[in-house]
Image (cartoon, helix red, strand yellow):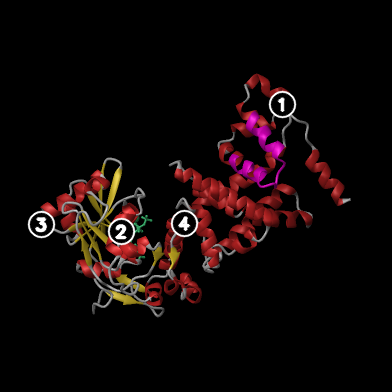
Amino acid sequence: MITTFLKKILRRPKAPAGSMQMRILQAGQHPLSPDTISRCALKVTQALQAGGFKAYIVGGAVRDLLLGRSPKDFDVATDATPEQVRRLIRRSRVIGRRFQIVHAMCQEEIVEVTTFRGSADRESESQVTDEHGRLTRDNVFGSMEEDAARRDFTVNALYYDPSRNELFDYFNGVRDIQARKLAMIGPPAVRYREDPVRMLRAVRFAAKLGFELDSEARQPIQELADLLLNVPESRLFDEMLKMLLSGHSVACLQQLRAEGLHHDLLPLLDWILDQPQGERFVTQALQNTDQRIMEDKSVSPGFLFACLLWHPVLDAWKRRQDAGEKPMPALFEAMTDVLETQRKKLAIPRRYDAIMKEIWGLQPRFVQRSGQRPYRLLEHPRFRAAYDFMFLRAQSGELDLAIGTWWTDFQTAAPEDRESMLVQDEQPKRTRRRRRR
Ligand code: ATP
Ligand code: MG
């Protein structure tokens, strides 16, 4: 049905990608309806409109609905100022420094309400760029049209008014959705310079939506990739996390690498993916993550980063042991080496260090399956994460799969059956000694 609707609309003269050609699609000309919108978002648009303001569902939600997907969340754009929004919506609060937005809350759901942003062309004291063209201040309100022009991709500049059932399409976003094309609004190089994070957003949307990044939007990326160094680390990290938690992390990392954007984010990625075992391990970990996201299960970023960096840790650990260091101190030093290398580019916030180090530090204990040691490991507060991690190692061929399945059985066995399962396995140590001789 969606395709038929879109096809009808598309039998119109073509405008170049990214140029403004506003069109209002009435009820019957598009597949949306108010009952595809969340209750909270409807309440917000109705309250704003009742207060005499414009209010539209905008961005990812409209795009996803046109694609027949259920939106992750709903964003609303309005001509009311944040203070006016706050007064009209009882459970709401103003957040943000650079550009204030309002969070409207209904039970579990939060709807983000933004005031229309001013145009990039507007002569304004409020829009300031640094020497690379990056917008360092961008906090001027504007008209709906200007707001559309400030958005990143044509498919993200669609506005839906649920009360009139009208869809506003400023840049042929509907046409691009149909063509599964990700095209930038305005000149891509300028838009990337204004905000280099748009390069990462391009990768994420292309991977997540299965769209092709339009050649004009793709072309400047390689040359401008290093502008990411100029972006505040916390924003880069948030964007990195969005990619990993997008439900399409495998595709995101592949595309990130294909566009040459990984150098400043994950400097070790080439090294990791160029080794068959490292690649298998990371791919398996990311596939599991994507699956968990699809099933609405929680995912721990610390666990994910531990996975991404495990093979560099293994490598550094081996080198230190080969140089004569004792296994456990060598492992802890290796962790520090790898985290330091990563920190030289994009620092993973220190709050994740503890979990990563615990997961890594528990790994040698999984080969010990005799005496009291396996019982103690089961009791460890991080056992579950460390076990999942160990199982991935086993699946990727780095660790004997029999050890992986032994732990699966051991933890689910009745306590009285466990003793008979213990294994006298001094094997790893002996192998190592033999090799040294
Ligand atoms: P998602 O499904 O990930 O939420 P989204 O398109 O809704 O996708 P958001 O980050 O929630 O993405 O942003 C909402 C909208 O705000 C976008 O659709 C886009 O129109 C606009 N936007 C967000 N970030 C930028 C940016 N860096 N530059 C220009 N426009 C942006
Ligand atoms: Mg969104």
Label 3 CB-ligand 1 distance < 8 A: no
For discs 1 and 2, the disc positioned in front in the rendered view: 2
Q: Left or right: where does residue 29 sit relative to residue 216?
A: left
Amino acid type, residue under disc 1 in the picture: Met
Label 1 CB-ligand 1 distance < 8 A: no
How far apart in space, not on screen, are marks 3 and 1 (Cα)? 72 Å
Residue found farthest to the right = 437
Amino acid type, residue under disc 2 in the picture: Leu
Amino acid type, residue under disc 3 in the picture: Gly
How far apart in space, not on screen, are marks 1 and 4 (Cα)? 42 Å
Q: Foreground residue, 6 or 387? A: 6
Q: Position of residue 229 (x, y in %)?
A: 48, 70
Q: Mark 1 or 2 closer to N-term?
A: 2
Ligand 2 sits in quadrant = bottom left
How far apart in space, not on screen, are marks 3 and 4 (Cα)? 38 Å
| Callout 1 crowding tier (Cα within 10 Å): few <14, some 14–19, many ≥20 | few
